[in-house]
Amino acid sequence: MTILALSTYCYARQIYGSADIEEVLRRDVHFRQLCANEFPGAWVIRHFRDVNREAIRFCLLAALGFLAEQKIVEDFVTKVNKAHLAEEANRRITMSMFIDTMLDGD
C-alpha cells in the first residue's frame, strides 16, 4: 500500500493537509518517476486516512519510534517514552483531520 507509506511519511515529517501531501507528491521527482505521473488527489488521500486511520496510526507510531531512536543514537535524547510517541501519533492524525476540515470551509 503505497498510499499508506506516503501518508505515514508525510505525517512523520509534519505535513498534514491532504492537499499539501498531494502537492509534495507532485513536486517530488522520484515519486513522479515511480508513479508515472499519476498522483492520488487530496480527496483520495483524505478518504484513505479516514478509512484506514488505525493502520496509519500503527505505521506512524513505528516511524516516530524510529526517528526517536535516531535521536538517541545522535545523543539528542537519552530515552524514548512510548506513551508520548503514541499520543504524538494520535495528535498528528487529528491535526491532519482538522486541517482538512478547515479547508472545507473555503
Image (tube, rainbow, N blue to C red):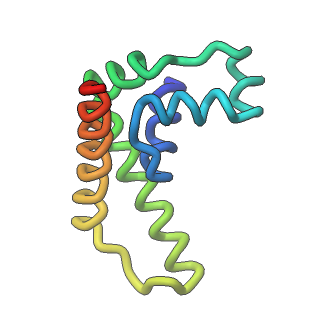
- Number of callouts: 0
Question: Where residue 103 appears, x then y in whole percent?
Answer: 31, 30
Which quarter of the figure has residue 7? Answer: top left
Q: Position of residue 78 (x, y in %)?
A: 42, 86
Q: Quadrant of the C terminus?
A: top left
Q: What residue appears at the point 68 percent right and 33 percent down from the top-left corner? A: 27
**Residue 45 image offset from top left, x and y in percent:** 42, 23
Q: Nearer the viewer, residue 103 or 15?
A: 103
Image point (24%, 31%), residue name: 101
Relative horizontal placement of residue 33, taking residue 11 as reference (left or right): right
92 relative to 63 in the view: left or right: left
Q: Could you say which is closer to the camera, residue 86 or residue 92?
A: 92
Picture quadrant where residue 83 is located: bottom left
In the picture, measured across the screen, residue 22 lies left or right of residue 17, that is right
The image shows residue 36, relative to residue 49, as above or below, that is above
Q: Is residue 41 left or right of residue 60?
A: right
List x then y, in percent, for residue 68.
Answer: 45, 69
Q: Quadrant of residue 55?
A: top left
What residue lies at 27% left-to-right and 33% top-to-bottom?
53
Residue plotted at (26% across, 22% down): 51
